Image: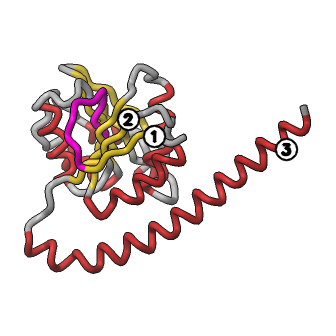
């Protein structure tokens, strides 16, 4: 059984999750949050985004740079939750594979928030397929998930980057298939081994 997925279908959800990366992802997440598509928005903020994040038009002031001062630069990755006028910041331990690390961290976060049944996940269009396979492998099959592509950057930048981005994403997708396939195989083998031992 897998989670229920829909691509680019804007509908109400319990949580908006915005992956780290281009600023347009976070701006779009904020726009959907302001329009009431979810009562909570959770931002993944990587090391090099921290200064820019605090400069966004957030509904609640967040001095993430101040929070990050106590964390060594290579370890700086945070989840920032905004709900109404409340904000919470949690440290996320960076991993070798960024998207995989983010979805793993989201899975752990959701374990502590069991009332969340539906998600809008926002990233770039070329990124959504890799996010899907991570979610299918790591998140609860009972979740309703809509994968949303943030509006593109300018057409001039898009022409320059599109081919390179697509080729790089395909290579990453193959790598992720391999990593997750090995992991799932190991978990199944371990489960069978334990079953035989009982």
Q: CA distance from mark 1 to mark 3?
A: 26 Å
Residue at the image position 31 percent from the left and 39 percent from the top: 17
Residue at the image position 40 percent from the left and 47 percent from the top: 76
- Asked whether the beta carbons under mark 2 and mark 1 sit within 8 Å of each other, the answer is yes
Q: Would you name the residue on which mark 3 appears?
A: 193
Residue at the image position 51 percent from the left and 59 percent from the top: 96
- Asked whether the beta carbons under mark 1 and mark 3 sit within 8 Å of each other, the answer is no
Mark yes or no: residue 43 visible: no
- Mark 2, other Cα within 10 Å: few <14 / some 14–19 / many ≥20: some
Q: Is disc 1 placed on a helix, strand or loop?
A: loop
Which of the 4 quarters of the picture holds residue 167? bottom left
Q: Which mark is residue 3?
A: 1
Q: Main secondary structure of the magenta part?
A: loop
Q: Earlier in the sequence, mark 2 or mark 1?
A: 1
Residue 90 in the image: state x and y as whole percent.
40, 33
Numbered range of the magenta stretch: 8-17
Which of the 4 quarters of the picture holds residue 62? top left
Q: Would you name the residue on which mark 2 appears?
A: 144
Vertical placement of residue 189 versus 191, above or below: below
- Mark 1, mark 3: which one is toward the viewer? 1
Give the tally of numbered discs: 3
- Mark 3, mark 2: which one is toward the viewer? 2
Q: Is residue 15 magenta?
A: yes
Query: Nearest the camera: 27 or 132?
Result: 132
Q: Quadrant of the C terminus?
A: top right
């Amino acid at each position: 059984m897998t989670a229920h997925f829909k691509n680019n279908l804007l509908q109400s959800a319990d949580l908006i999750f915005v992956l780290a990366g281009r600023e347009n992802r976070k701006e779009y997440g904020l726009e959907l949050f302001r329009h009431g598509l979810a009562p909570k928005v959770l931002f993944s903020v990587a090391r090099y985004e921290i200064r820019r994040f605090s400069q966004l038009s957030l509904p609640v002031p967040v001095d993430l740079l101040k929070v990050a001062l106590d964390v060594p630069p290579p370890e700086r990755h945070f989840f920032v939750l905004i709900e109404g006028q409340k904000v919470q910041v949690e440290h996320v331990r960076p991993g070798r594979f960024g998207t995989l690390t983010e979805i793993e961290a989201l899975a752990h976060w959701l374990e502590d928030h069991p009332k969340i049944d539906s998600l809008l996940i926002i990233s770039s269009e070329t990124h959504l397929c890799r996010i899907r396979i991570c979610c299918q492998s790591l998140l609860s099959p009972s979740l309703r998930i809509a994968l949303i592509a943030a509006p593109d950057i300018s057409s001039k930048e898009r022409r320059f980057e599109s081919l390179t981005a697509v080729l790089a994403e395909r290579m990453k997708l193959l790598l992720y298939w391999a990593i997750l396939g090995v992991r799932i195989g190991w978990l199944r083998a371990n489960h069978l081994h334990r079953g035989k031992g009982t």
